[in-house]
Image (cartoon, rainbow, N blue to C red):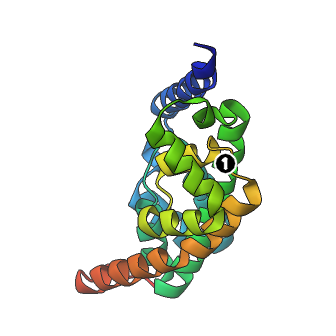
Amino acid sequence: MYRYKRLFAVAGFLALLFALFQFSGLREHFSLAFLHQKFLDNVVSGMLIFILLFSLGNLIQIPGWIFLAAAVLALGQFWGGVATYVAALLSCALTFWVIRLLGGDALRQLRGRWAGRLLAQLDEHPVRSVVILRTLFQTVPALNYALAMSGLKFRNYLLGSALGLPLPIALYCLFFDYLARSLHLTTY
């Protein structure tokens, strides 16, 4: 039971954060329209709000594509991608430290061959593993939680994230820009 203590702490934190999100009124600020408007109002304050909401969203399991779409719609393909890349790295870093503080290396405490093989692969090639995971899954919150509790060193996590995020962000930018132009939704 002790080995699951940290996992329960992370689950409790997630439940508390989600309840706070639901009952505080923050939920209404997690929309394309709200984020888009904040960028249009003022790019600097919009970017700060964007980073804060992206970080909170990452902690409570909101997918990053919502933020990327808002940035591309408001700032265009290039600057929307840059804003998302910066926000994604900062969000991933914050999530890592919060979850590491609560969960430690809880995944290392789990028994089983499957978990052992995954962690061994991560230990053998930490940066490459994170690059591949980021390329495939971008900033998926569950991935951030798992990597934070894997015992992975922060520098390997951040370097792998920095190298793995540009390609999927660029592809999403192309997609959302194409979609926005096709639907005549662009404002930049």
Name the residue located 41 percent from the left edge and 54 percent from the top edge: 31
Viewer-closest of 102 and 3: 3
Viewer-closest of 145 and 179: 145
Q: Residue furthest left?
A: 183
Q: Mark 1 falls on what kind of element? A: helix
Name the residue located 51 percent from the left edge and 34 percent from the top edge: 21
Q: Position of residue 43 (x, y in %)?
A: 62, 73
Q: Is residue 16 visible?
A: yes
Viewer-closest of 11 and 19: 11
Report which quarter residue 41 is drawn in. Answer: bottom right
Name the residue located 68 percent from the left edge and 70 percent from the top edge: 44
The amino acid type, in three-letter code, at marker 1 is Phe
The answer to whether residue 170 is above or below residue 96 is: below
The answer to whether residue 33 is above or below residue 72 is: above
Q: Position of residue 143 (x, y in %)?
A: 50, 50
User: Dot 1, how many residues are within 10 Å of its Cα: few (below 14), some (14-19), or many (20+)?
Assistant: many
Residue labelled with disc 1: 96
Q: Residue furthest top?
A: 1
